[in-house]
Image (cartoon, coloured by chain):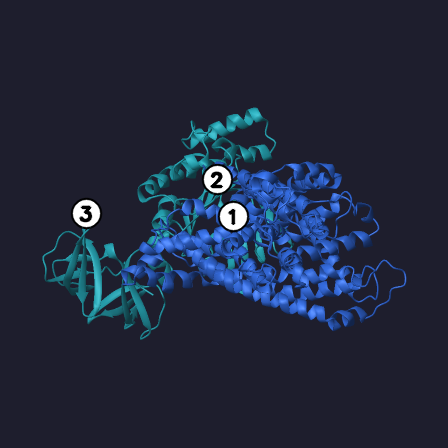
Chain colours: A cyan, B blue
């Protein structure tokens, strides 16, 4: 059942159109990442759901009750939507203790104070801060503050929890830990969560589903695997991973595949862009899909090893083929010429 | 606050700001006081004032004095700021708080101090005469007035320039050092150019203050009949024998017409200045510039300035309040007395004045901060035509010097039936003070509000608090410290205010400032110096309180 529905949402500041028609549904118990570059409208979309921005057109429905409807002139204020929001800066109130920060939402709902104490203690326990209720936010580390912010958003059991770049203020090591515990916490509580990020690795790690945004529009929505392995456009393929790019012209087309040219070597790739013969196209292949092979074959090119970078778990090799650079991962290689295989089903022609 | 409350607050403010100005403009087109039954519309008041030679002389004096004091205050203030913030000058720590003293002492009190110290029979004058046989200066000339006005307004320039210099990061200067510039070159080509907008803003501010000058010319210009616009207005009260309200209204309109563009210019400059500072480097630890041998002449200049603008007038004034008489051949040890202070207590109006001043500064100041906070909250995080309207409305009272605003409020209380019973109460004084310091107080409170990030309030909304609850539970507690320090500043400001109460002075509405102005006119030097000393002591307590509070809230 859809927990949150967004229908043709538009938003602009003056003549600056930020959201240009967003339609999406979020199911109960699902974690969805809104992924995009800065300026793609992802944060604005999140703030519109929270009621902190006013869209110009469209509709937002939480459960069965509409909270925004441009046509009907309905705009439920933030405090009546009952959602939870974790801010990028955490936005903990510096004049309240951790306990009071978390308890505030319950007090506003006129929960009896015995229940307040018990529920706050339970939720602080849930985020691993059971013993720190008396502290003030400035007495805590960044990672602890983030847990408090999450506890504050969870304590009143919101139907949907929203997170704005929740991990961006943590250092690299903490971020990897936080990815794991945030996902398991949300899953354990069976919450519907929407979070904003610009980091595709973070999005794939935490989310059940990713909505990729660009320029105020949805580019692609789907599971992390779908977005990584079946991007619908050049933008999506570039955003989700690291690629080799081959600029060329379509030379032939056959059975869903297109023939392109890499410095004289003919290559077959999946026709994803639907361009006609002799049109300009870009061939794209993920770094890890290029492999070094012993000898000549179908869809192979011969390239000079230019340099190799040691990454610890493996090597990254940089090859030169004509005026094009090709990168791949693998074991240590001897200098000189090598044959590289680019499998046709992994080479996407846009 | 919800939308309706916000609009109501802004409309109330618009009425409070526009009513006095509207009444003044209306009065200026009448041929007699507005409360007389047989007044008619006419331009006769304009004709009279624009024909009056004294008006043009006062106008030209105001312009000359404003230019002169700007030319003195800006370079001295800018150099002082550079020396204090950027160099290894000895004794910076204890000099710095003293620099701002002339800002906190009312200028009419400072003027009295100059008279009793440097006037023809002053302490310093007679001492110098004992050495040289004559006094090598004359206090009551226009040029002395310009020098005194210039030197007493150095703190304003210092304040704006030093805060800008302080927020300028060392990294921009270090970058210049790395490319090969010496310390002096860095100061001239990097540091000072980067704060030029702030210096320019301070210059326009000082020029504007010079235009509004009242206390100094009232005391120092009077013996030679040197009039400026404000003193011309003050003397005009009885020019025709009857209260010539229409003439005063015309002068007020003239003052507002000149002041308003200056206020608008300041506002514009402040915006550009802030934009400039926002592109500054990181404000990391600053390393002072070594100026070597030059620090000794620099210290001498600063100490000399302090001696002239702070030590001489204030010590002279305090000393004079403790001696029974002073003149040639009088020995200090024979004339020391506490009689003047005893005498003070025999005048019920003076005692009332001291009590009223304490009340208006403490209780009135707190109420005013409450008003400024309500106004700020009404515009807080709200982009609309209403808040833009409010931005402009705040500027209007700024264009009215205290004397003028006091007069306008007096008329409003006279004109409005339901207000007139309160004309002779402290309510009228409080309204006038709150209006005169509206722009200043609004800036103090908004400074505190700007410190809190919008997400702290948004978080409250999302968690389920209405706009009103957010103001009460989150915004106000967060700016509590800022509000208390705003109140302390307003406390001192109301304590030293003298010109606003002048036209509102009546039995029951005495405040020290307006009493001083009227006592000086009657020539009661003993009482004036005693009352001034009391005022200085009260301001001193206020400053002490402020520094204690500052230490506590920072530590």
Q: Which residue is mark 2?
A: A92
Q: Which residue is mark 1?
A: B311
Q: What mark, if any, has residue A312 been given in the picture?
A: 3
Of circles 1 and 2, the one toward us is 1
- Toward the top, the furthest residue is A114
Q: Position of residue B316 (x, y in %)?
A: 57, 47
**Quarter of the image with the C terminus of chain B in it:** top left
Of circles 2 and 3, the one toward us is 2
Q: Position of residue B331 (x, y in %)?
A: 57, 43
Query: In the rendered image of this protein, does residue B453 appear above or below residue B191?
Result: above
| Residue B216 in view here | yes
Of circles 1 and 3, the one toward us is 1
Chain letter for mark 3, please: A
Mark 3, Cα crowd under 10 Å, few <14 / some 14-19 / many 20+, is: few
Q: Judge by depth and name the residue closer to the eye, A18 or B270.
A: B270
Circle 3 SS class? loop
- Toward the bottom, the furthest residue is A278
Q: CA distance from mark 1 to mark 2?
A: 49 Å
Q: Is residue B406 left or right of residue A155?
A: right
Query: In the rendered image of this protein, does residue A203 appear above or below residue B355?
Result: below
Chain letter for mark 1, please: B
Residue A79, quarter of picture: top right
The mark that comes first in sequence, 2 or 3, is 2
Cβ–Cβ under 8 Å for marks 1 and 3:
no
Q: Position of residue B553 (x, y in %)?
A: 49, 38
Residue in the image at 81% along x and 70% along y: B44
Residue in the image at 47% along x and 57% along y: B77
């Amino acid at each position: 059942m859809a927990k949150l529905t967004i229908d043709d949402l538009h938003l602009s500041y003056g003549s600056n159109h930020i959201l240009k028609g967003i339609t999406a549904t979020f199911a109960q118990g699902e974690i969805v990442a809104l992924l995009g570059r800065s300026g793609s409208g992802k944060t604005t979309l999140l703030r519109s759901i929270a009621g902190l921005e006013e869209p110009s057109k469209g509709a937002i429905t939480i459960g069965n009750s509409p909270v925004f409807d441009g046509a009907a002139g309905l705009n439920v204020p933030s405090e009546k939507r009952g959602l939870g929001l974790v801010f990028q800066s955490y936005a903990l109130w510096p004049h309240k203790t951790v306990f009071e920060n978390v308890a505030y939402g319950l007090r506003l709902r006129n929960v009896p104070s015995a229940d307040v104490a018990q529920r706050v203690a339970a939720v602080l326990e849930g985020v691993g801060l059971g013993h720190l209720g008396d502290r003030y936010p400035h007495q805590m580390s960044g990672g602890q503050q983030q847990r408090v912010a999450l506890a504050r958003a969870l304590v009143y059991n919101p139907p949907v929890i929203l997170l704005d770049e929740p991990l961006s203020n943590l250092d690299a090591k903490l971020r990897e830990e936080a990815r794991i515990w945030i996902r398991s916490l949300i899953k354990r509580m069976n919450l519907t969560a929407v979070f904003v990020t610009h980091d595709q690795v973070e999005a794939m790690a935490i989310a059940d589903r990713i909505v990729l945004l660009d320029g105020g529009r949805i580019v692609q929505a789907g599971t992390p695997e779908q977005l990584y392995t079946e991007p619908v456009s050049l933008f999506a393929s570039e955003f989700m991973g690291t690629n080799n790019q081959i600029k060329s012209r379509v030379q032939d087309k056959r059975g869903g595949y297109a023939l392109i040219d890499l410095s004289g070597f003919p290559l077959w790739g999946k026709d994803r862009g639907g361009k006609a013969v002799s049109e300009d196209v870009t061939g794209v292949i993920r770094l890890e899909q290029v492999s070094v092979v012993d000898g000549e074959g179908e869809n192979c090119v011969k390239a000079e090893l230019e340099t190799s970078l040691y990454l610890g778990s493996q090597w990254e090799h940089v090859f030169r083929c004509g005026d094009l650079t090709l990168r791949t991962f693998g074991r240590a290689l001897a200098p000189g010429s090598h044959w590289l295989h680019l499998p046709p089903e992994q080479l996407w022609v846009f | 606050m919800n939308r309706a409350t916000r609009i109501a607050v802004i409309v109330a403010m618009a009425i409070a700001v526009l009513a006095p100005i509207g009444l003044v403009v209306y009065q200026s087109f009448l041929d007699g006081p507005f409360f007389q039954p047989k007044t008619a519309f006419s331009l006769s008041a304009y004709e009279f004032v624009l024909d009056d030679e004294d008006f043009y002389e006062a106008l030209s004096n105001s312009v000359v004095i404003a230019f002169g004091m700007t030319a003195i205050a800006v370079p001295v203030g800018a150099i002082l700021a550079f020396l204090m913030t950027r160099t290894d000058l000895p004794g910076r720590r204890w000099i710095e708080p003293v620099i701002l003293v002339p800002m906190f002492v009312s200028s009419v009190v400072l003027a009295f101090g100059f008279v009793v110290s440097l006037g023809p029979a002053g302490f310093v004058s007679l001492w110098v005469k004992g050495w040289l046989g004559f006094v090598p200066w004359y206090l009551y000339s226009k040029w002395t007035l310009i020098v005194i006005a210039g030197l007493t307004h150095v703190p304003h320039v210092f304040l704006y320039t030093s805060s800008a210099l302080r927020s300028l990061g060392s990294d921009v200067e270090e970058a210049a050092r790395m490319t090969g510039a010496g310390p002096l070159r860095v100061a001239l080509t990097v540091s000072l150019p980067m704060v030029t907008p702030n210096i320019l803003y301070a210059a326009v501010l000082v020029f504007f203050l010079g235009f509004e000058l009242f206390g100094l010319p009232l005391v120092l210009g009077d013996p030679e009949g040197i009039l400026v616009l404000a003193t011309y207005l003050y003397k005009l009260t009885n020019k025709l024998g009857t209260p010539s309200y229409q003439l005063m209204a015309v002068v007020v309109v003239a003052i507002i017409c000149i002041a308003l563009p200056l206020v608008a210019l300041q506002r514009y400059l402040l915006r550009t200045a802030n934009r400039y500072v926002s592109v500054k480097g990181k404000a990391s630890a600053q390393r002072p510039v070594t100026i070597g041998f030059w620090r000794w002449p620099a210290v001498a200049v600063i100490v000399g300035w302090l001696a002239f603008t702070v030590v001489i007038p204030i010590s002279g004034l305090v000393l004079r309040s403790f001696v029974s008489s002073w003149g040639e051949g009088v020995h200090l040890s024979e004339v020391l007395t506490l009689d003047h202070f005893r005498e003070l207590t025999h005048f019920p109006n003076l005692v009332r004045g001291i009590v009223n001043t304490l009340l208006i500064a403490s209780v009135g100041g707190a109420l005013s901060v409450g008003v400024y906070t309500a106004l700020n909250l009404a515009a807080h995080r709200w982009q609309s035509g209403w808040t833009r309207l409010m931005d402009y409305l705040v500027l209007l009272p700024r264009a009215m010097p205290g004397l003028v605003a006091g007069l306008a409020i007096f008329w409003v209380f006279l004109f409005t039936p339901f207000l007139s019973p309160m004309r002779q109460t402290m309510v009228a004084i409080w309204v006038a003070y709150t209006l005169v310091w509206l722009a200043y107080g609004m800036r103090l409170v908004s400074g505190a509000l700007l410190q809190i990030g919008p997400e702290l309030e948004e978080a409250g909304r999302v968690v389920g608090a209405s706009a009103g609850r957010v103001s009460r539970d989150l915004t106000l507690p967060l700016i509590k410290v800022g509000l208390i320090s705003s109140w302390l500043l307003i406390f001192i400001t109301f304590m030293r205010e003298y010109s606003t109460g002048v036209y509102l002075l009546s039995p029951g509405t005495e405040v020290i400032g307006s009493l001083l102005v009227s006592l000086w006119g009657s020539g009661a030097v003993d009482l004036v110096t005693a009352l001034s000393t009391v005022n200085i002591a009260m301001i001193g307590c206020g400053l002490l309180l402020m520094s204690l509070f500052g230490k506590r809230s920072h530590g």
